[in-house]
Structure formats: C-alpha cells, structure tokens
Image (cartoon, helix red, strand yellow):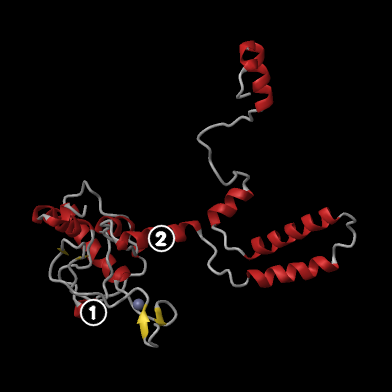
C-alpha cells in the first residue's frame, strides 16, 4: 500500500473509491439547508428504495440526503462528546468540527479526507445509509497509524473489555473481610483458601460488564466458544504401552 500510494494512478483509484464509498458531503446540503430541512426521526423504519423501480437512482439520492440530514449531522454536547483536554479546553472527543475539503483527497503519506463542505457532517457509507437509514461512520484504512487505532478501538468495543481496574483492589479487600468472618465452618486451610479465591472471582464477575450476546449464550447453555475440531484426551503412557507391544524393538531405544 505504501509503495502503491506513491503513484498518481493508484491515488486516482483511491480517490474514486472514497468518492463512491466514504462520503461526508451531499450536493445542496450546506449549513443553511441543514438548518431549514426537517429532522426525520422515523426514517429508520422505512424501506430502502426498490432496485427494480424506474427512479431507483433518484430515490437513492433523495434517501441519502434525508438520512444524512437526520443521522449524520454531529452536534456537540457535554453529555455526549465534549470533554476537557489536557490544556483545560472543552473539545469534542470525535474531533468535530472536521476539516473541509473541496474534493476527495489522498497523498503519498496516507493523509486522506473525503469531500466535505459542512464541518459537522460525519463520514458515512452511502450504501449503508440508504439501506439501513441509520447513523454510521466509515474510515479508509491505509496500513498506517489510523489503522492501528481503528483495530484497537474495534477490538476493545467488540470484546467489551473491562475498562476500569482501579476498583479491583477494593473489591478484593471487601471479599477478604467477608471471607474472614464467614469461613470458620471450614476446617481445612486448603478449603478455606479455595473458597477465598472463589469469592474474589465472584466479586470481580459481579462487577464486570458482559455483552448481551454472551449473557444470552450462557443462559441458553450454548457455551462461549465454538471449536472447529473435536478433541480427545490422549494418554501418553497408554500410547507408549501400545507402541511397545506392537514394536518390541523400540524397547531398547534410549528416547523412551
Ligand atoms: Zn462533538
């Protein structure tokens, strides 16, 4: 990718790709028309245009404009995206307003931007917008630092990793206190320690965020992983005995 991007011809392909798939602009939708065009909150319940219809392309363009107006215009609020940066300034964590550009752009250093004439219209994929009528975000991955960030973010998001570890020690301390008062019935140190571990694990699980899919899979007894193979236990001593019975000559070999 890095080598290809040095050629104008390949950059032309990328520009065409951006124009087709990564948009942040609709002709005629400027700041004034966004203000005066009504926001359609029920658009998400409508069907996509019929591809066999005579006016399919015009209907798609109309749908795209309405979905963009209703779903892609970003508004910064304190409860959603505004936070204080390290200089004490209130900024949007999604980095709005975004840079304007008269045309689709990419350079050989992998800097790129879609055409954008309204600073608060977020990137979207027209096929997704027209089909699903929902807010969406799309990026071009050019094997650079952006891609690393996107992979990190998506993995975090999909695996619902535990965000905060700072309360773990407090939870453990609480478990230990409870354990000290409620483990006298166990004689054996081993059993008491086992119960302590169980209680600590239980306390952490209790506070952990789980995805809906994961909870549902457990409730339904589907398990939390899928194997492409079946595994069987292989007992080495049995295998050795069987090999030696079949090939007695191996008996004298040192590696046994
Ligand atoms: Zn914002």
Picture quadrant where residue 29 is located? bottom left
Residue 237 can be seen in this image: yes
Of the pair 104 and 254, the residue shown nearer to us: 254
Residue at 50% of width from left, 35% of height from top? 228
> Eyeballing the image, is 38 above or below 192?
below
Q: Position of residue 137 (x, y in %)?
A: 32, 63
In the picture of the structure, the residue carrying the numbered disc 2 is 152
Of the pair 71 and 153, the residue shown nearer to us: 153
Residue at 20% of width from left, 68% of height from top? 25
Using residue 101 as the reference point, say whether residue 168 is left or right of it. right
Quarter of the rendered structure image containing ligand 1: bottom left
Q: Earlier in the sequence, mark 2 or mark 1?
A: 1
10 Å neighbourhood of mark 2: few (<14), some, or many (≥20)? few
> Eyeballing the image, is 85 above or below 167?
below
**Is the C-beta of the residue carrying label 1 under 8 Å from the nearest atom of ligand 1?**
no
Q: Position of residue 61 (x, y in %)?
A: 19, 60
Q: Count the marks: how many?
A: 2
In the picture of the structure, the residue carrying the numbered disc 1 is 36
Using residue 15 as the reference point, say whether residue 127 is left or right of it. right
């Amino acid at each position: 990718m890095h080598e290809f991007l040095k050629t104008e011809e390949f950059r032309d392909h990328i520009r065409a790709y951006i124009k087709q798939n990564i948009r942040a602009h609709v002709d005629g939708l400027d700041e004034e028309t966004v203000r005066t065009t009504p926001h359609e909150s029920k658009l998400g319940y409508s069907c996509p245009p019929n591809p066999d219809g005579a006016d399919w392309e015009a209907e798609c363009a109309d749908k795209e404009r309405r979905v963009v107006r209703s779903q892609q215009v970003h508004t910064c609020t304190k409860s959603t995206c505004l936070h204080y940066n390290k200089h004490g300034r209130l900024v949007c964590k999604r980095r709005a307003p975004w840079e304007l550009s008269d045309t689709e752009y990419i350079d050989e250093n992998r800097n790129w931007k879609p055409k954008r004439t309204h600073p608060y219209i977020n990137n979207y994929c027209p096929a997704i917008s027209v089909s699903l009528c929902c807010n969406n975000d799309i990026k071009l991955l050019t094997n650079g630092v952006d891609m690393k960030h996107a992979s990190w973010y998506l993995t975090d998001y999909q695996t619902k990793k535990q965000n905060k570890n700072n309360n773990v020690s407090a939870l453990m301390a609480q478990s230990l206190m409870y354990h000290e008062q409620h483990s006298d019935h166990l004689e054996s140190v081993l059993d008491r320690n086992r119960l302590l571990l169980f209680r600590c694990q239980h306390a952490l699980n209790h506070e952990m965020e789980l995805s809906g899919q994961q909870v549902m899979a457990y409730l339904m007894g589907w398990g939390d992983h899928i194997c492409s193979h079946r595994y069987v236990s292989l007992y080495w001593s049995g295998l050795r005995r069987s090999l030696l019975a079949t090939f007695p000559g191996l008996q004298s070999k040192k590696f046994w």
